[in-house]
Image (cartoon, grey):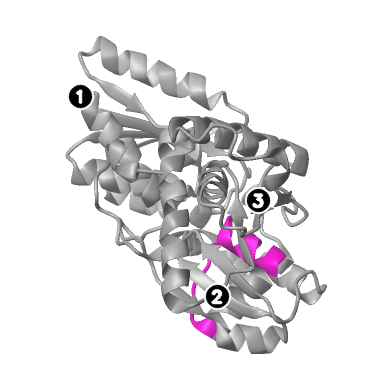
Amino acid sequence: MHFARFPRLNFAHLPTPLEPMPTLSKVLGGPNLWIKRDDCTGLAGGGNKTRKLEFLLADALNQGADCIITQGATQSNHVRQTAAIATKLSLRCYALLEDRTGSKEQDYNSNGNVLLDRILGCSVSKVPADTDMNAAMEEIAQQLRDDGKKPYIIPGGGSNPIGALGYANAALELLTQANNMGLKIDHLVHATGSAGTQAGLITGLRATNSHIPLLGIGVRAPKDLQEANVFKLAERTADLLSVPGVVRREDVVANCEYVGGGYGVPTDSMLEAVNLLAQTEAILLDPVYSGKGMAGFIDLIRQGHFSGQENLVFLHTGGAQALSGYRAIFEAD
């Protein structure tokens, strides 16, 4: 896979660290645990969307865009990172925030990523749950076109084949790091939501014949739907990379037993995971993605799902900026 064939901007802080987690490994009494720190990609606090945005914003500029439209949930990490790079490139950013949780907490609706969106100069509009977000973005786009603007629409999570290139490339980065360290990775685990991160990773892992199993811990959709969404996007990403058919349906695996009451709705296991990582490895997770992903990862380790001698890597997708939006939950805990 030759990624230089694709337009790309270079603003992410790469490669991100690949670090051992010895204290957590000892506390859990299980496998050798490692963490890939994609919370350290820069761009207004970092996170996994930054890798995707390198390719998406390059495509936007190539198309002559002068403004960006995107969407996410209220505490969207993707919107924060998109607003940041749009501002850096002197592009106006318009974002729709969907009220998926129905929370009335002031911090949830005004603090955390929402506050940062506004500080970054993003034009934020809030819409009810179950809004057709693609249609709503297109409506804004048409209004901007009527005003003589050239908008570029980025889907939620940056999850389309262009965005997924960021994580196909991340698979190469991880393999290079592991090879240089002499680290044999037995499993790679991460939180999966809008599908782009998992689709890109599995495409990269399969195209390189890495033999590393990938497990996504779902944070929103049921297992069948999540896996179907990831596989569909992985197929399109593989086609874009000229490696059609490299991803098989059985390569796409998601465990969606840790979603709890829904997307962005706190769970006891998420609270435990956030506190445990902070108090063992001084690593901050987020309540929506990495917190629930780590909660599932920890539970599977405790259940003996992995061998005690294996090397397991957790990909940290970032999002600690959302913690202040959930202040009441953590204070109650």
Magenta extent = 281-297
Q: Secondary structure at mark 3?
A: loop
Q: Give the structural element (helix, strand or loop) at label 1.
A: loop
For the C terminus, the image quarter is bottom right
Q: Nearer the viewer, residue 319 or 15?
A: 15
Q: Residue at x 75, y 44 (%)?
A: 223
Counting from the top left corner in percent of width and height, residue 218 is at: 67, 50
Q: Please state which amino acid type lies under the numbered disc 3.
A: Val
Q: 10 Å neighbourhood of mark 3: few (<14), some, or many (≥20)?
A: many
* Badge nearest the viewer, 3 or 2: 2
Q: Is residue 70 left or right of residue 14?
A: right
Image marks 3 and 1: residues in contact by CB distance under 8 Å: no
| Residue where numbered disc 3 is placed | 219
Q: Which mark is residue 64?
A: 1
What percent of the width, then of the height, locates residue 87? 22, 43
Which mark is nearer the camera, 3 or 1? 1
- On the image, numbered disc 2 is attached to which residue? 34
| Label 2 neighbour load within 10 Å: few <14, some 14-19, many 20+ | many
